[in-house]
Image (cartoon, grey):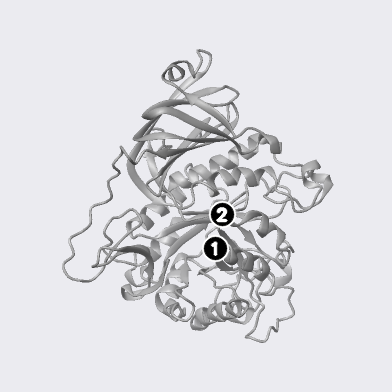
Amino acid sequence: MKRILLSLFALVVFGSVHAKTITLTVKTTHRQTVTGFGAACCDGAMRPYGTDKKPAQLLYGPTSKVGLNILRVEISPSFNGDDGASWGSTYNWEGGVPSAQVVKQRGGIVFGTPWSPPGDFKTNGTAQGGNSEDQGWQRGELREDCYEKFFPWLNSYLKYMKSRGVKVDAVSVQNEPDWWVNYSGCLYTPQQQLNLVKNYAHMLDRETYSGVRLISAEPLGFDPRYSNMLLNDKTAREQIDIIAGHIYGHAPLQSGNLKDAAVLAAKYGKEVWMTEHSSTDNIGERLPTWHEQLLFAEELNECMLAGCTGYIYWYMRAHWAFVSTGEAKYGAANKTKNRLLPRAYVMAHFAKNVTGSTRLETSLDMTSGTEAEREYSAYIKDDSLLIVMAIDTTAENSTLRLRLPYLVKGGKHILSTGNETTELCQESEIVLEEPTKTFLVDMPARSLNTYVLVIDNETTAITTPEMATAKSAKSQFYDLQGRPMPEPRGLCIERRADGTSRKVYLGPRGRVISVK
């Protein structure tokens, strides 16, 4: 690891007259706490790599090079009961099990998404969405007389996965309920989803399956009507733990959909997960350029600025994703199967450092949603680290003047500047002669930068949110930013009468159903 000594003299000359100096002020205002980052493992009609553990082994866990901690698995419609019988389809629930087992063994989160309920629950009698001539252009929707069967069907999935040694942490209502497809799919209007969740979600067996959480349907463009209708209804709101969606055609900040949905979610203490997107899956027979990788980094950053607590990419293995397929036609880096691709290292900047942190406001947050040549975000982690992300898509070297809310005594600079492995996640140590709140760091052209700075806790007092006065000997509950929760539910902090604290999941009526 290189060492960069920032003396008082160096603070003056570090940024040369030829480099632009940009000032970034990090504030003390806390925003969302980030649960983590992940990818999908989908079998059947998707990518038949679910039974290959290698991608998950490369990507998941704190000791991996990437540090993913959330896995999305398809809940296919074909499985019928507990005997493993299918309905004549190549879909089955076994495909995602090996990867899910790896993720759980490494302390990660596994959630399941239905592409469709079973065909005999639907208006068109098939798991297919119905948008094709041979299916008669029938809109595949969940029949109202089968609403009461939906959550018991999800319970059977949870039972199956538990029998395979996988504790599923959450299940969602539906993949892309607003996208009429000719593959496995099911349509819901926002009102239909509300009716299903409000009247039947209590049938999800949270007690048997260790506090499994419920995720909203995941609309194609993160249409906030789906989540807002749930959250504006008290009964439905009590059943939903996470709101989710995809960002196809709707950039995180530019369109406003994700950002708008996150506002109401934050009000009620709900997590916000972006559960599927791939920005360069249509690039043809080539690997993404470095500029496209930086645009992916900006997408991750913008999702954080929009209020996301979780970001889940599409496939784990594809020439435009994280792990190589072994197909030489896509480029030399892809010709050997199951090797990390540059996009995995880009993701590592966020997954290895931002997971578990709380975002802080900065002076250069993209509040307008306008595309920028440079982007930034900042985070605090365990009251001991300040993390600053800086993305530069320009051809100009820059100097970043950091103005921080706390004294820091050093840290490291993680730098990625190109598609070659030697140019990815290079680490340099930042050494300060004395604790300081303001200093200069290098920001090279066309680079992704993570500055991990150690807070000097010996001289810096980080105040914790003030506790509400307990009116009795009972526990008090707070969101992850330490704010009292008017309606405790989902992941929160319990501060008990004896003065100790712990993270818990709360179910209906504030019942503690699991402890982290």
Q: Say what secondary structure mark 1 lies in.
A: loop
Q: Quadrant for the N terminus, please.
A: top right
Residue 441: horizontal and vertical position, in percent?
A: 48, 27
Q: In the figure, residue 513 lies in which quadrant? A: bottom left
Residue 233: horizontal and vertical position, in percent?
A: 34, 68
Instruction: List the residue tagged with mark 1.
Output: 107
Q: How many marks?
A: 2
Residue 173: horizontal and vertical position, in percent?
A: 51, 69
Is residue 348 found left or right of 170 in the rendered image?
right
Residue type, mark 2 in image: Pro
Q: Is residue 433 above or below residue 168?
A: above
**Residue drawn 20% across and 59% down?**
468
Instruction: List the residue tagged with mark 2.
Output: 62
Using the rendered image of the protein, determine whether residue 334 is visible from the camera's viewpoint: yes
**Residue drawn 65% across and 62% down?**
41
Question: Which residue occupies the foreground of this view, 493 or 437?
Answer: 437
Is residue 497 found left or right of 503 in the rendered image?
left
CB contact under 8 Å: marks 2 and 1 = yes
**Residue drawn 45% across and 65% down?**
190
Question: Which residue occupies the foreground of this view, 461 or 361?
Answer: 461
Q: In the figure, residue 485 lies in which quadrant? A: bottom left
In the displayed orientation, state which residue is furthest to the top.
17
Residue type, mark 1 in image: Gly
